[in-house]
Image: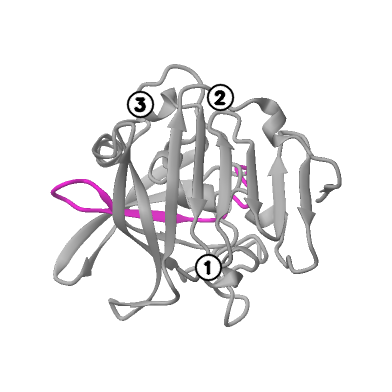
Amino acid sequence: MKRNKLLLSIPILTLTPTLTLLLLLSCQKPPSGPASYDVRYPEALIKVLDAHGGLQAWRKMQALTFDIVEEEGNETHTIDLHKRWDRIDAPSHSMGYDGTELWLKADTSYKGRPAFSHNLMFYFFAMPFVLADEGITYSVADTIVHKDQSYPGIKIAFNEGVGASSLDEYILYYDPETYQMTWLAYTATYFVQEKRTTFNWIHYQDWITVDGLLLPQTLQWHKKSQNRFTPRRDPVTFDQVKLSSTPHDPSVFKRPEGAEVVE
């Protein structure tokens, strides 16, 4: 399935007519300590996490790989779930982060921005679990209605200094009967460094079960206007999803010969 090449190379929302996607939860710190629920989590979020297989099961996993389906050749994403190291391999480029260096090896057709995109799709894919990271505060958001179905919301904000832009905000919307995540609304503030009131919208419409965890198979970006949702581009499809309780070898993330360090 063809996907808009701008998806990983420029932000999608408010700075230009094409601007919106790039900078959300970049490099939030994962929780440390026992893999159990903390009193800081609201009850609704705990129910959402449980509906997706449970935070304890998620934290037992050390390694994740998945493909993003592309017409010109899939992107393979490799992630260390605890260290949050990552690597992307695609026909035109490879990039990665080993905890110290962010690197890129690409041909002239690659026009992306590695500092913004190297871990971007991981965070969209790893919802709702990444919303249990440290440095997050929670509140109740207004309910939305789509096709006569109401979806309550949990608003997520970040403590100062957390992530690439602590001014970003997210709202997780869930089915009130199943507690499965259904929508994500988010702002992107990296370029402007000020609060935004206009949100971007993703519909989490298809799910697959991998090692007991419910993970997204299809994401559809939407435009919301007067409580109506309109698809904005082709959906993003994930394939070849694998989890493991054994971490990847650290060498997977190291800068290969011919790759350049990027800022």
Q: Is residue 28 visible?
A: no
Question: Mark 1 or 2 closer to N-term?
Answer: 1
Which of 17 and 206 lies nearest the eye of the viewer?
206
| Res. 128 mark | none
Q: Residue at x 68, y 27 (%)?
A: 250
The mark lying in front, picked from 3 and 2, is 2
Q: Residue at x 59, y 58 (%)?
A: 23
Count neighbours of disc 1 (C-alpha within 10 A) and say few if under 14, some if 14 to 19, many if 20 or more.
Answer: few
Residue 199 rendering spot, x and y as whole percentages: 45, 68
**Marks 2 and 1: in contact by CB < 8 Å?**
no
Q: CA distance from mark 1 to mark 2?
A: 30 Å
- Which element is circle 3 on? helix
| Res. 57 mark | 3
Quadrant (top left, top right, bottom left, bottom right) of the N terminus: bottom left
Which of 197 and 56 lies nearest the eye of the viewer?
56
Q: CA distance from mark 1 to mark 3?
A: 34 Å
Magenta part, dominant SS:
loop
**Residue located beneath label 2 in the image:** 247
The mark lying in front, picked from 1 and 3, is 1
Q: Colour scheme used in the picture?
A: one colour
Task: Give, as a three-letter code, the residue at label 2.
Answer: Pro
Residue 168 in magenta stretch:
yes
Q: Is residue 43 visible?
A: yes
Residue 75 rendering spot, x and y as whole percentages: 57, 54
| Res. 71 mark | 1
In the image, residue 239 sits, relative to residue 59, either above or below, namely below
- Which element is circle 2 on? loop
Question: Mark 1 or 3 closer to N-term?
Answer: 3
